[in-house]
Each structure stands twice: as structure tokens, then as C-alpha cells.
Amino acid sequence: MSTPHLPGPRHAAAPRPARRFAPLLALIAAAALAACSTAPKGPDYQVPADAALLKPRASGSFAEQQRAAAEATTAAAPAPFDAQPLPAHWWRLFQDARLDALVEKAFAHNTDLRQAAANLERVQAMETEVAGGEKPTISVNGGPSYGHPSGLSMLKKDYVPPDTYRYSAGVGLSYQLDLFGQIRRAIESSHASTEAAQAALDLVKVNVAASTARAYAEACATGQRLDAATQSVELQRQALELTEKLQHAGRVGEIDAARARSQLQQLKAALPPLLAQRQSALYRLATLTGDLPEDFPRDLAECHIAPQVAGTLPVGDGAALLRRRPDIRQAERELHAATARIGVAIADRYPKISLGLSAASAGTLAGFGKSDALSWSLGPLISWTLPNTGVADARIAQAEAGTRQAAARFDGTVLNALRETETALNQYARELDRKAALQASREEAALVAGQARRLYQGGKVGYLDALDAERALAASDAALAASEATLIDEQVQLFMALGGGWEADTQTAGRK
């Protein structure tokens, strides 16, 4: 008996079940690749254990605040600082409606703020772009044409196909499998950069509020100094008139009148610099609020009363400062972004795998929609550049060095914030002491000048003695007015060092 021979067509049809399940196998393979996703490469971010931010003494009470309190206790005088936290909108402590309006106008129109806000919008758009890497990408193409392909492309020699209308259309779907966390690290870094840009905007707000308050206070304080200087000029003019009368009466000589005129001119010489200083502050205030320099507030040109903070200044402690200062938050977020970029660089060592699905149709318009004009494909696309060890390692080294640089900048920002605050506290406390001494000196000088003036009028002392007393009084008045202006400026500097106070409650920096 012979063995039956199976027909050939049945052998040819045997592989068809495998082809039928090929798409399913491709999907299973893609799912398996996605399931192999590992944790993102690179270090997970946390504030370095040795960061200056985490040192216990950095979060305690300020050293100068403790020293001033101890001195006040010894001297039985009120301390210049209050342990209460800095309130929101610190400039309202001056209780000056004009200042409040100027700061709000600066927030709305200041050019530096507009730049910072635009930069934040740009960084937010970049974050949205990076986050798009997690989503599948769909591409569509197509279009009609008229002509013919080459005969050789149709495997027909010496054949010219007829001209006809043709079309092509296709759609593709691709999705990158983030197996090694490169996209996740990129999104993490981008989000931290957005938070850093927000902190940078907050920092500009702090500077704008402080600069506006300083310009306003300087304009008014300079007006107050002008009043004191003008009063000294007026007193000296009266003294000159008296001297000239005594000279006409033959009771004093020409030399006394010349000395009186010289003293009057010296006092007048102090007025132009003060006028220029006030005008400069007004010009600065105009540009801070978004106006042309010549459009400065006209009513402030007549301001002669500097804003004053009643009572002691609320300063809080180091912990509140480290939470509140925008530059500290900015530096900490930049450190987070730099740390995440290490993971992005490490992921370059590994292959990138994308899942693709495409479908297309091409042919003549007469055959549009027919099955023989359709094509499709499904499968993963693997890209891996080899050898890439040197390039990837160089990128990793760059990212690690950038992280160390960001960590050093973070520590430097924290230390600088503490230094600025301690310095501002010390300068303000010392200026208070100076003002008290100047006030006592001025009272003594006024007493001496009054007595010398009466003795001179009675002919019991020479004019030189009376002139020296008047000079001392004028110098005391000028020094006291300058000290009062400096005190106001030191207050604003202190509020600026403390980190603003305008913003809403912020999260603790570095503890997310």
C-alpha cells in the first residue's frame, strides 16, 4: 500500500493561523514591554542632609534680635524688634494710603514684573511641551496628485504608464514606552523649573514693593530734611539781619557781618543736593510704577512727612524667613530640577522603545477604498545608539556637576539670606541708638545756641561764639533729619531682607 500524498495547497495554507494572530502577538509584545517599566533612573530628590537650610541654628531666633532684646532689658528700654511674624503686605505697617496705592500700581505696571510674568508663562508652556511626551502622537498625511509612476518601478521595461489622478492617505499612532523613566524625570525637572520661575516672580515682587517703598520714603524724608535745612537757613538769615543792625549801630564790626553772610551761604549750599535727591527719588518712583520719569506724582513733590512704623518691627524667626524668602525657594527648586536631570541623562544609556500603529491607502482615484490599496502595520520601534557609553557618561557627568553647583548655590542663598537679615537688624538697631544720641545732642545744641544768641545780643560774647553755637545747632538738625531718613530706609531694607510679606502662605521650602 502506498502512502497517500497530501495536496500542495494544503501545505501552503498551514502558516495562515500564525499570520492571523500576528497583530495580537504584536500587542502582547508591546504590553510586555510596557510591563517591564522600571523606576526612573537617577537619584530621587531630597534636600541634602548637610544643607545649610537644615542646620538647627538657621531656623532659630536671629542673633541680633536676641542681642537687642538683651540690651533693652538691661537698659529698661523697649526692644526694637518683635518676635511676631512679618504680616502680609508689610508696607501697610506704615499706615500710608498713598504708599499702598503706589505699591499696587507698581504690581500692575512694573516692567520687571511683566518680564518675570512672561518668563513664567514661557516656562509653563515648556512644561506642557515636556509633559506631552507621555501622550501618544497621532500623525495624518495625504493628498491628491496627477501623473504616473515610472515603468521600471512597476517592473515593466520600456513601459510608460498612462497619466491619471492618484491619491495617498495615511494615519499613524506612536507612543513612547517610558521604560527607564526618562520622560518622567524630564517632567519632574520641568515642573521644578516652573516652580523656580514662580519663585523668581515672587522675588521680583519683593524687590518692586521694597524699591517703591524706598523711593516714596526717600522723597518724603528728603522733603523733611529740606524743611530742617530751610529752617536753619531762615534762622541764619534772621541772625544776619540782627548782625547787620548791630553793625549799623556800631556795636559789631564788618567781620561779624561777613561771618554771618558766609554761614548763610553754607547753609543755602545744602539745599540743592537735597532737591536733586528728592527729584531723583520721584523719577525712580515714576518708572517703578510704569510711568515716564516726568510723570511722577506731583503731590509727592510737596511731601514733607516721612512714613513711620508705629512701635517695634515684627521680624519673626529664621524658620519663617527660610520658608518665606523667594530666592531660597527658587534655589531649592532649581536644585530639584538639576537632580532630576541626572535621571534624564542616565536614561540615555538605555534603548528607547516606541509602539507604532499606522494605516495607509494609496493608488488611483478609481481604486479608492479597495482592499488592495490599503496597508497597515503594528509593532515596536527600538532605537539605541551604540557605542554610546562615552557620550552618555559625559552627559551624566555634566548633570551631576550641575547638581553640585545648584546645591552650592542653594546653600549660598540660604547663608546670604541670613546674613542680609542679621545685617539689616544690626544696622537698624544701631541707627536707633545713633538717633537717640543725635536727639540728645540736638537738644543740647539748641540750648547752647539760644543762650549764645541772647548773650551776643546783650554784648556779653563775641559773634564768633554765637556763630559757632548756631553752626552746631544747624549741624545737629541736619544730622538728626538724616538719621530719621536713614531709619526709614533701614526699615524698608529689613522688610526686604525678611522676604516680602505680600504673598499668600507658602509651602515649606525643600520639604515636599
Image (cartoon, grey):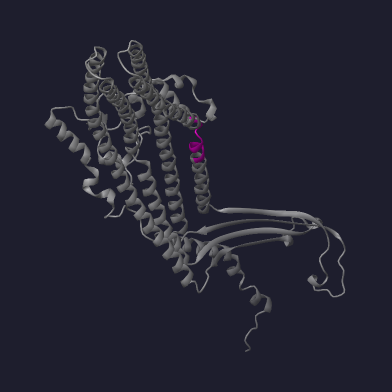
Q: Position of residue 45 (x, y in %)?
A: 35, 54
Identify the magenta region.
108-115
Residue furthest to the bottom in view is 1
Quarter of the picture containing the N terminus is bottom right
Name the residue at 57% across, 64% down.
Answer: 379
Residue 467, relative to residue 372: is it above or below? Answer: above
- Residue 154 makes an appearance in the image: yes
Main secondary structure along the magenta-highlighted residues? helix
Q: Quadrant of residue 483?
A: top left
Give the x, y percent position of residue 360: 69, 58
Q: Nearer the viewer, residue 205 or 102?
A: 102
Picture quarter containing residue 407? bottom left
Seen from the viewer's position, the closer of residues 395 and 116 is 116
State the image coordinates of residue 221 (x, y, percent, origin top left): 37, 25
Which residue is painted at 50% across and 25% down in the image? 296
Q: Name the residue rendered at 38%, 57% in the picture.
A: 405
- Magenta stretch contains residue 206: no
Left or right placement of residue 378 versus residue 402 in this view: right
Residue 198 found in image quarter: top left
Q: Is residue 68 left or right of residue 2?
A: left
Residue 510 visible somewhere in the drawing: no
Count of numbered circles in the view? 0
Q: Nearer the viewer, residue 415 or 375?
A: 415
Front residue (pair 495, 42): 495
Looking at the picture, does residue 183 appear above or below residue 161?
Answer: above
